[in-house]
Image (cartoon, rainbow, N blue to C red):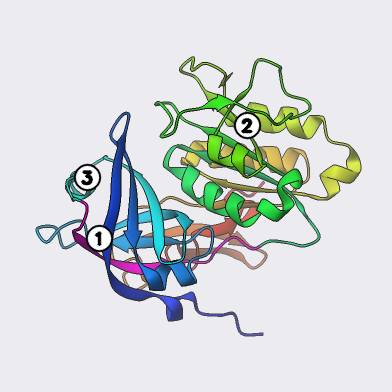
Amino acid sequence: MKHPDHRESIFQEDAEIISHDCHPCEQYVLRLRAPYCAAKARPGQFVHIRCGDALPMRRPISIMRVGDDRIDLLYKVVGAGTRLLSQRRVGESLNLLGPIGKPFPLNPERPRRLLIGGGVGMPPMIFLAETLKAAASDTFVILGSEIPFPFLPKPSALLVPGLPDSVIGAMPLLDDWGIASRLASLQGFAGCHQGYVTDLARAWLEHSDPGQLADTELFACGPHAMLEAVATVARDYTLPARLSLEEYMACGVGGCAGCVVEIHTPQGPTMKRVCVDGPVFKASEVFPV
């Protein structure tokens, strides 16, 4: 069977900035009017944005939410490109390519989903969670950050068995959707778990019975060390896991091979492009035993 080529859906469009909100530590939520991308985007995909005319190299940014004709992006200023992007104003136009990459596949045989996002790896998890609202009771989201979250955490109204009573901080949007979430950080934020996202993942999984574990699949996006730890959790509980990788990119459409990573297959190691062969890969392919 021929696999679909996700490059076929990549489109270039000029997107109008609808809103551009600044959050602590130079985190920004950017809302763009981008009808084509909004209609085609799936959780796990990203856009490649031209940040300004003075900087021809685009920057890849994960899609956090979509609406009828708009997309929401979360990014943090880390270099010249995102610094230039942060200076763009409402009403201006940004040229983007997207949606790019393979999205998260959902296995109907694993309807219980654990979503883990760290830092700017949170957006794909929020996008995926929104698509799972109909199955809210079978979805749990863990978000981690070592800087203030780009939203105001609130005590959750949703019970999560197996977690300490003091860990009640949640993302309000997820609570509104009826999806349980909890937050983790080493920075002492009120209501958050004082530790790693994988601590909460293990506590939740440890409280699951064998039938629940048989229904569970993990999804994650975040820094390399976090993804490696998530892969270890998945291996320890014999769970399938899908990881969205973060990687520096040049062209973003598979032409330059500037974002290749080593992927392990039954036939042996091979090099894959994160932009179009990913960014979503099986955890066992990225972090083999």
Q: Position of residue 249 (x, y in %)?
A: 32, 58
Instruction: Please tell me the numbered disc located at residue 9.
Output: none
Q: Residues within 10 Å of mark 2 (few under 14, many from 20)?
A: many
Quarter of the image holding residue 207? top right
Residue 175 among those drawn in magenta:
no
Q: Residues within 10 Å of mark 1 (few under 14, many from 20)?
A: many
Q: What amino acid type is highlighted by mark number 2?
A: Thr
Q: Which residue is mark 2?
A: 198
Residue 276 visible here: no
How many marks do you count on the picture?
Answer: 3
Of labels 1 and 3, the one closer to you: 3
Q: Which residue sits at x=71%, y=16%?
A: 165
Instruction: Give the camera-side residue of 271 and 183.
Output: 183
| Image position of 159 with respect to 277: above or below | above
Q: CA distance from mark 2 to mark 1?
A: 33 Å
- Indicate the secondary structure of the residue bearing disc 2: helix
Instruction: Give the camera-side residue of 285 and 12.
Output: 12
Q: What amino acid type is highlighted by mark number 1?
A: Arg
Q: Which residue sits at x=67%, y=65%?
A: 266
- Indicate the secondary structure of the residue bearing disc 1: loop
Q: Position of residue 60 (x, y in %)?
A: 34, 57
Q: Which residue is mark 3?
A: 86
Q: Which residues are magenta?
A: 90-105
Horizontal side of residue 253 vs 130, given as left or right: left
Is the N terminus in the top left, top right, bottom left or bottom right quadrant? bottom right
* Residue most extreme to the bottom: 1
Residue 151 visible here: yes
Q: What amino acid type is highlighted by mark number 3?
A: Ser
Residue 104 among those drawn in magenta:
yes
| Image position of 284 with respect to 83: above or below | below
Of pointers 2 and 1, the one earlier in the residue sequence: 1
Instruction: Please tell me the numbered disc located at residue 58.
Output: 1
